[in-house]
Amino acid sequence: MRVATLDSETDFDGWRKAARAFRSAGVRPGEAAFRVGRDDGGLFDELEPQDGGQGAQFPVPRAFVELAQAVILHRSEDRFDLLYRLLWRLEREPDLIRVVSDRDVADAFERAKNVSRASHKMKAFVRFRLAEEEGDEHWISWFEPAHRVLERTAPFFARRFTTMRWSILTPDGQAHWDTRHMTFGPPATRDMAPAEDEIEDFWKTYYASTFNPARLKTKTMQGEMPKRYWANLPEAALIPDLIASAAAREAAMVAAPAPEPNPRLAKTLSRLNRDRAFEEGFTPSSLEELGQAVQACRRCPLWRDATQGVCGQGARPARLMIVGEQPGDQEDLAGKPFVGPAGQVLDAALAEAGIDRDDAFVTNAVRHFKHTPRGKRRIHQTPTTSEITACRWWLDAERSLVKPKVILMLGGTAAQGVMGRKPEVMKARGRAIPLPDATALLTVHPSYLLRLPDREAAAVARERFVADLKMVQRLL
Amino acid sequence: MAQLDLRQKLSVLADAAKYDASCASSGTSKRDSSDSKGLGSTEGMGICHAYTPDGRCVSLLKILLTNFCIYDCAYCINRASSNVPRARFNVQEVVDLTLNFYRRNYIEGLFLSSGIIRSGDYTMEQLVLVAKTLREVHGFRGYIHLKLIPEADPKLVEMAGLYADRLSANIELPRDEALQRLAPQKDVGVIKKAMGQVRLGVEAAKPEKRDRIKPPKFAPAGQSTQLIVGADGAPDTEIIDRSASLYGGYGLRRVYYSAFSPIPDASSSLPLQKPPLMREHRLYQADWLMRFYGFSPPEIGEATVGGMLDLAIDPKLAWALNRREHFPVDVNTASREMLLRVPGLGVKSVDRMISVRRYRTLRLEDIARLCRGIDKVRPFISALDWTPGGLTDAADLRARISPDPAPKQLSLF
């Protein structure tokens, strides 16, 4: 048995030096031992290992070094041996650290996980108490970490409480922050930290009040807040009483008779609760009224998953009315028609044709965004005939208020909304269609231009689109 | 004496806020106070500072500014017609409590909500003022979650987004019709519009690659919402559909499901029973399947009976038992997508398996070391030394994996 002596329980550099020497001397895992301190000499063959020749060394992956630095903080006695065994195997199995299903590797990762969890719990369960020293505030905590994570975790508190002078005292050692520098000290005892803090009663009040007695789940609580930490958590003292009284509190809530309704309140409510729903027979007298009324529209189910109904916007009265299909993702959020990608295509083409969008009234055949969710996106869906028909009521109302001379219909849905029938777009486009109240002109929807994959075809299609818009210009 | 008053207020206003299930303090931008100004830090991962016996964590100081409210929502303890004791903090009191708790490392920050007093605008203004004071006067770098008052002026929502890490507005009831019945003054359209505004704000704050000057941060931890489960008779499939629509429509980080629980001084329009906690749990599992496992709402629907998720087994196992033609999955060759469909394998286990199989051919014992329990996994996989044979198609497979009798679903209607 070859024995190496380390300076402390967390002496990683000492372990690394010794392990390197053992490895180069060919000491097998079962024959290497690591001891902390110098008080157990005599029993073992104490032999300070020599630094081996450089030639005998081999590189280890960074992942192993990081893993070892964590594992060494674990309180188990055999952690040094486990790490040495891994080091020994790494020479023949250089990918070993990546094989997390290997018994030794899994064991090491499990211990590293425990260490990381102990560090996380320290961030959570340290409770500072305020001590005044010569008019200076000093925040002191007594804490008992599950593993030796004080030095690893202290920088977190320095980043968080940079402007506070604080100390964390543990049975393993002390960490002190003076607002600029960190220092570490020897093991501490509980009586070195303040025994109370005036805000603790407020904290306990909060803890007790935020607990819902109707949902007792004590196992979950203990899983996340193991009992080993309770002694240093002031609020944990309340737990037994909270659990004991929970059933009675819940029963009282369930048994209590429902309170008498307050008649004055009921009267106020009925006044406030005006029926905003859309009613048959309602005729909007202005576009504003129409915009409000459409929010209550339940003529088809599309309202349910949409954000809001989107009505037309623009000049009024307007000589030109442009009708699209339905609001898209962006329009649904903004509450305005044609603000998304298709709207930008339309704007550019209008400008090219010499039409000012501000002189036109822009609207849609359907008021609500029809879509299906896919992951975190909403995919556009074409409205059905019955949905377009249900929505014609709103478009007709808009037409009677805007009184356009020309109606530009973008795509088949728009045509169906305006005329009540769906012509074949590619055949009927670009021709004036007389309607009782206006002249209609059909062209493609600008999103059709966005979808064409072939650049040349897209350019041709766009030219035809602009040509259709120029036709509109002539009709006006 | 004044102190006692403040403690009483804290007790009333924490009690009133506890029905909001949201508790997260994660996913925001990283920042700390190491420039020697201000106080606090966030490092991406949230920290739960305590747990109460209801199994829920205490990460934030979750309180209401006031529990006075002009609304009368039947499911809410703070509704106008309830006789609970009322209290109101002033802005400075909330700021002081937050800082005092934070310095002692009790909390990660503040979750501030409020009953509606005077008007939506006035209430939202007060909430924003608390956040503004914490950030601008005290240089507070901790986490702030503000509740949106949906009917408030969009300019106030914009300000809230500048100071808060997360914003939320609660949809509350999966069925819009039920919202009209139980919360007559609430308008789901107004809530959706406010959430839409937050999504547009968050998107506008994401810098384009070309931008030299970064736009100001807007709610870097995004937005969330809450659905109360078991108060309006909506089946699970309807709740899942509503969630999918909310995730897609407003880019939500989280939808919280809160089993409706008895409240003191409850309205007669809601029956009082123990909250269906297992149903809530299954909904969270189904939600995870959608967000991290590539399940679509209709696929989750396949695993339900009469629109309700199975209470005895988790939704992924329920789905797999119905769709056995997809199994067994060969752990050494299957795609990540397919491995994620295996009951008992989580995202972490699957990623580890994929990493290990570049170096080793996986045996059953390897899988056992990489997942939580092999019993549930075994019938659905094949490995180097293992094929399930007829086990995958065994008629009593469900009973073998989950021998417990199904707990009875508590129904509220």
Image (cartoon, coloured by chain):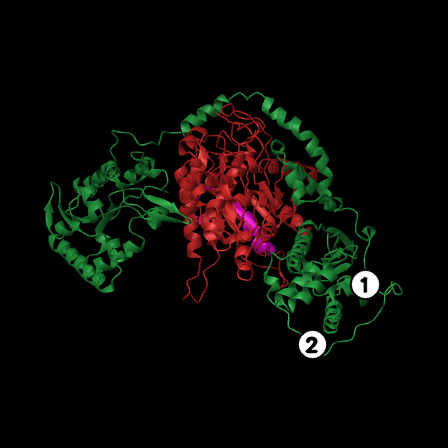
Chain colours: A green, B red
Q: Is residue A148 above or below residue B91?
A: below
Determine whether the residue tagged by mark 2 lies in a helix, strand or loop. Answer: helix
Q: Residues within 10 Å of mark 2 (few under 14, many from 20)?
A: few
Q: Residues within 10 Å of mark 1 (few under 14, many from 20)?
A: some
- In this view, the residue in front, B211 or B242, is B242
Asked whether B284 falls inside the magenta stretch, the response is no
Name the residue at 42% across, 38% down.
B302
Q: Which chain is home to disc 2?
A: A
- When the figure is inspected, residue B213 is found, relative to residue B14, above or below; the finding is below
Q: Range of the magenta residues?
A: B129-156
Q: Quadrant of residue B262?
A: top right
**A276 relative to A411 in the view: left or right:** right
Q: Does residue B316 appear in this view?
A: no
Q: Looking at the picture, do discs 1 and 2 lie on one chain?
A: yes
Q: Chain of mark 1?
A: A
| Residue B222 x/y as whole percent | 48, 50
Outermost residue toward the right in this view:
A42
Query: Which of B65 and B42 lies nearest the eye of the viewer?
Result: B42
Residue kind at label 2, given as amino acid type:
Ala
Nearer the observer: mark 1 or 2; the answer is 2
- Is residue A3 something one can see in this rendering? yes
As drawn, is A435 to the left or to the right of A35? left
Q: Amino acid at mark 1?
A: Val
User: Where residue A184 sits: x, y (%)?
Assistant: 76, 63
Q: Percent position (x, y) of residue B234? A: 44, 32
Q: Quadrant of the N terminus of chain B?
A: top right
Query: Dot 2 corresponds to which residue?
Result: A56
Q: Which residue is mark 1?
A: A36
